[in-house]
Image (cartoon, rainbow, N blue to C red):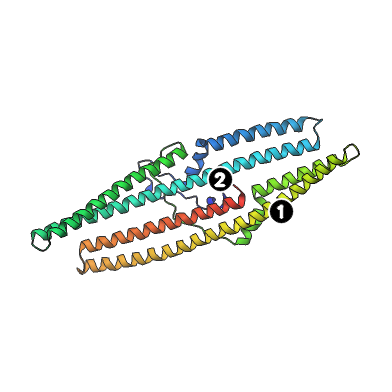
Amino acid sequence: MRILPFLALLMVAVPASAQGTGPAPLTLQQAWEVAPDASAAVLAARATLASARRARARVAADPQSLRVDRIGADNDLANAQRALDAALAANEASVTAAYFGALEADTALAVSELDAAIELQTLQAEQARQQAGAATDLDVAKAQNAYRQAQASAADARTRRTLAYNTLASLLGRNAPTLTPVTEAPPLGDLDAYRRRAAEANAQLVAARNAEALTRAQLQATDNDFSSRSAIQQAQDALADAERHVTEVTRTLELSVNAAYANAQAAGAALANALAADATAQQDLDAAKARLDAGSISPLAYRSGELTRRQAAQSLETARHAAILRRLELDRTVLGG
């Protein structure tokens, strides 16, 4: 399986605390490993590659095959390998996005259920105050409405979670009852390093260079006394077109890498802000706990603080996933997958 360089850094083990008598949570690495066998695009690309290998072997075994034929067979094989790499990269990207979508759906459900529990507690408190003559019918009605809205949000979150896990299961060819979170987003590297790697390994650029080499070989095979001037001119024009294509692909690739890198940078900045906000929310919750223990605030006020803390963690998870996906997009741009 083709694992993009950045994705290899995200391979995580199942935490010891998650290992019990039940099924172990699925990790992102395991999702990458099983998904290709459930992908029609990957399976088709594998079949095409196998066919190209057989064709290349037949040309290599034929003592009468020409140099141009061998170069063409080599290029067909290389193109088939690149097509498989692209299918695998697209599959990895889809699986990663679906995996993160399911994790975020888990978190959204937990937050919505906590909100509903707090709204229920608030309603019960208002009803008690009403019985004591300290709250009006309107106060209770407002609390009832807020609770119904929170219940509806929780029901919607459950539906969204089911859909998210179904999407992931369709990509994996199997169900994934629970997932292991990804808690780290490796730092972004230097732009020049990505540019150099793209210049060396980008699939579209390599294909363009191979096509140029083939047309050059065809010109060499044509430019002799056995060929007409028009045939030679056609071969020269084909080489000029191939050279221009290499130049255009190179230029477009540099622009694409620059844009993908800028997106990754922006996502990294958003992640840094989310980390800061999460740390502040934890400090606020710690302070609220101290006030709760001292009797300065009510348990309901503390639970509201817990909700704020969970929402900050939810935002952090979303920002981390976005940063990882932008890095994945950058790697795919570089490699041409």
**Residue at the spot 66% in from the left edge and 50% down from the top edge:** 201
The image shows residue 185, relative to residue 57, as above or below, that is below
Question: Where residue 174 sits: x, y (%)?
Answer: 43, 37
Q: Which mark is residue 49?
A: none
Residue wearing tag 2 = 89
Q: Residue at x 26, y 68 (%)?
A: 290
- Circle 2: element type: helix
Quarter location, residue 167: top left
- In this rendering, the answer to whether 280 lies above or below 151 is below
Q: What is the x, y in percent for residue 138? A: 15, 59
Viewer-nearest of discs 1 and 2: 1
Q: Is residue 292 left or right of residue 235?
A: left
Horizontal arrangement in the rendering, residue 333 relative to residue 268 (left or right): right
Res 247 label: 1
Q: Residues within 10 Å of mark 2 (few under 14, many from 20)?
A: many
Res 197 seen here? no
